[in-house]
Image (cartoon, grey):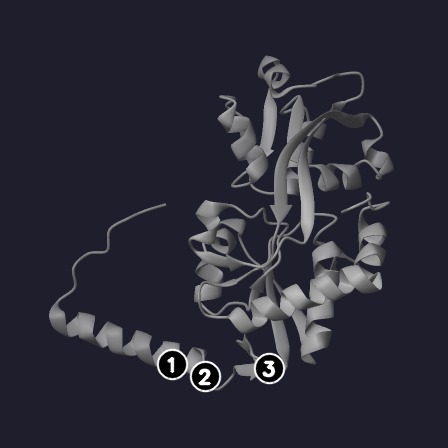
Amino acid sequence: MSGRIPRLPALVAAGVALVLATASACGGGDDGATVQGAKLVKKGQLTTCTHLPYPPFQFEKDGKVVGFDIDLMDLVAKKLGVTQKVVDTPFETIKTGADLNAGKCDVAAAGMTIKPERAKFIDFTKPYFDATQAAMSKKGASFASVEDLKKVKVGTQASTTGEDFVHAAKIDSVSFDDSAALLNGLRSGKVDVIVEDYPVVQGWLKDPANSAYAITGNYNTGEQYGFAVRKGKNDGLKNAIDSVIAQARTDGSYKTIYEKWIGPMPEGH
């Protein structure tokens, strides 16, 4: 959404600028800390922005946020000698860098695909997950190609690469705010098929409540997920995350986390 800010009288504008400058100085100072070169908005804490729910990467279970991304961020927090706190926030303000710039969190972990247009506003870590898109619908259907989706009513999650993929094929999909709403859209009959990241669909199909559905199309879009930090401001944290992920792949903990939340890890993943 865009809009214009009315012009303020010079005195009022100066006062606003002073307040904002003071708030900015305080927000990034007394409560924050630098640990092993990583800048944290709050001492003793790695604050993670995510968008719930997005199983198996992040979702609530028994009152706690859990998932693949959360476990990987716990490894980062452990390396830094701090604890992780998860903040649920809109995906739109994650991918634009608004939450990171506002000091709402240190890192964004939201099953987020690395894209050049997003990298203009946030600094991505090295890829930590290879992702593809999948079509989910009632068993018996087949959507082998994206062209097949043009024959039915398609649902997508707003602001995601799955939605971008569908729209690029000139398909006007029904857009849902989050993955839970997307799944409910399919189950309630609002749409005939939904397109979402393959691991998410795979996770849904483990639930007996979704036994009438299946993966009815696979689309290799070459996507890779990355974590993100504030643009140009936190190379220390970005490097720490890259180091932790590399170590996790070497020592087997990445594989353990992958198989805990997703299933058997493909060779070379």
- Locate residue 201: give its quadrant: top right
Question: Tag 3 or tag 2, which sits nearer the N-term?
Answer: 2
User: Most extreme residue toward the bottom, as rendered?
Assistant: 30
Question: In the image, residue 93 lies at what x, y percent?
Answer: 48, 54
- Specify the amino acid type for callout 1: Ala
- Specify the amino acid type for callout 2: Gly
| CA neighbours of label 2 inside 10 A, class few (<14), some (14 to 19), many (20+) | few
User: Most extreme residue toward the left, as rendered?
Assistant: 10
Question: In the image, residue 117 lies at what x, y percent?
Answer: 44, 46
Identify the residue under disc 2.
29
- Specify the amino acid type for callout 3: Val
Question: In the image, residue 91 lies at what x, y percent?
Answer: 54, 50
Q: Which of the pair 73/207 is nearer the observer?
A: 73
**Badges 2 and 1: C-beta atoms under 8 Å apart?**
yes
Identify the residue under disc 3.
35
Identify the residue under disc 1.
25
Residue 63 appears in the picture as rendered: no
57 lies above or below 144:
below
Q: Which of the pair 95/38 is nearer the observer?
A: 38
Question: Tag 3 or tag 1, which sits nearer the N-term?
Answer: 1
CA gap between label 1 and label 3 equals: 19 Å
CA gap between label 2 and label 1 equals: 6 Å
